Amino acid sequence: MAKTQKQRRGLLIKGGQLALLGAGGLSAWIQNVLALGVVYLPAGIYKLQGDVQINGQPAREGSPVRAGDTVRTGPGAQAIYVIGKDAFLQRGDSAVQFGNDASKDFLRVISGRLLSVFGSGQKTLLTPTATMGIRGTGCYIEVQETEVYFCLCYGRVNLVPLADPSQATEIETTHHDHPLKIYRGSGMPVMVDASVINHTDAELIMLETLTGRRPPFVRADGTGPRY
């Protein structure tokens, strides 16, 4: 029997919690962050493993990340960092560029995989297959050679596929409700529905914790998901 949407959400949450409690998990680190009691943390890298570079230079925990910077991770690497009211989990083999245009706030996912949570204010996400205007959102992006996977974990996005801007659409979700694959190759569909892959609610909770927030699927008392 096929799992219901609610059952899939529950498995996603439990899977993420188990991952954080396992070997090499971040649970103890998250507790330290919570103990700081700050509204949000200064910009910079808070956790990394493997080869992580900022503008071509080796990064370390505490390295600042600013507008105009490009963050690259090598194979098997990972970086968790904060810029203002936004927080990011960048996985291995990924490159992300943060815009320094004073007229707009944007970031470009050049390659790889990025989980992001954003505070208030309009931002633009640039990918090889689509442009996304977001505000107060959590989302996950995977860039491959001919397609981009995009999950709006919660929030609202104005999405414009580059292959056919006439198919621009506005999406609003509360809990991974409408993942998509967005294509750019000729003969391919512009957008197709997808399933939830390669990111967890526990990771979203961790990122929101870094900015003094909680995701909308967590109860006000912080005891767990509302579903």
Image (cartoon, rainbow, N blue to C red):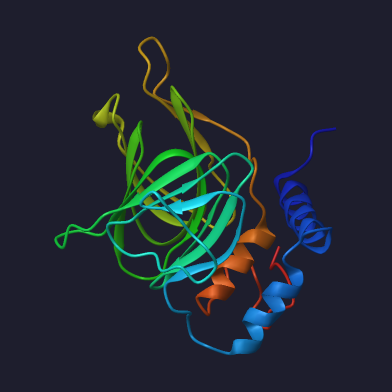
Residue sitting at x 31%, y 31%: 167
Work out which quarter of the rendered image holds the C terminus and state it: bottom right
Q: Is residue 57 above or below residue 151?
A: below
Q: Is residue 225 visible?
A: yes
Q: Quadrant of residue 189?
A: top left
Comparing 13 with 144, the one in front is 144
Q: Is residue 120 left or right of residue 220?
A: left
Task: Tell me residue 94's x, y (percent).
Answer: 49, 42
Residue at x 55%, y 42% (from the top left corner): 74
Q: Residue at x 73, y 51 (%)?
A: 12
225 left or right of 153 in image: right
Residue 152 visible somewhere in the drawing: no
Q: Residue furthest left?
A: 103
User: Residue 9 location, x and y as percent?
Assistant: 71, 52
Q: Nearer the viewer, residue 73 or 15?
A: 73
Total marks drawn?
0
Viewer-proximal residue, 108 or 72? 72
Q: Is residue 49 above or below residue 185?
A: below
Query: Residue at point 59% right, 55% down?
Result: 175
Q: Is residue 142 left or right of residue 217?
A: left
Q: Residue furthest top?
A: 187
Q: Quadrant of the N terminus?
A: top right
Q: Which x, y percent locates residue 15?
A: 78, 53
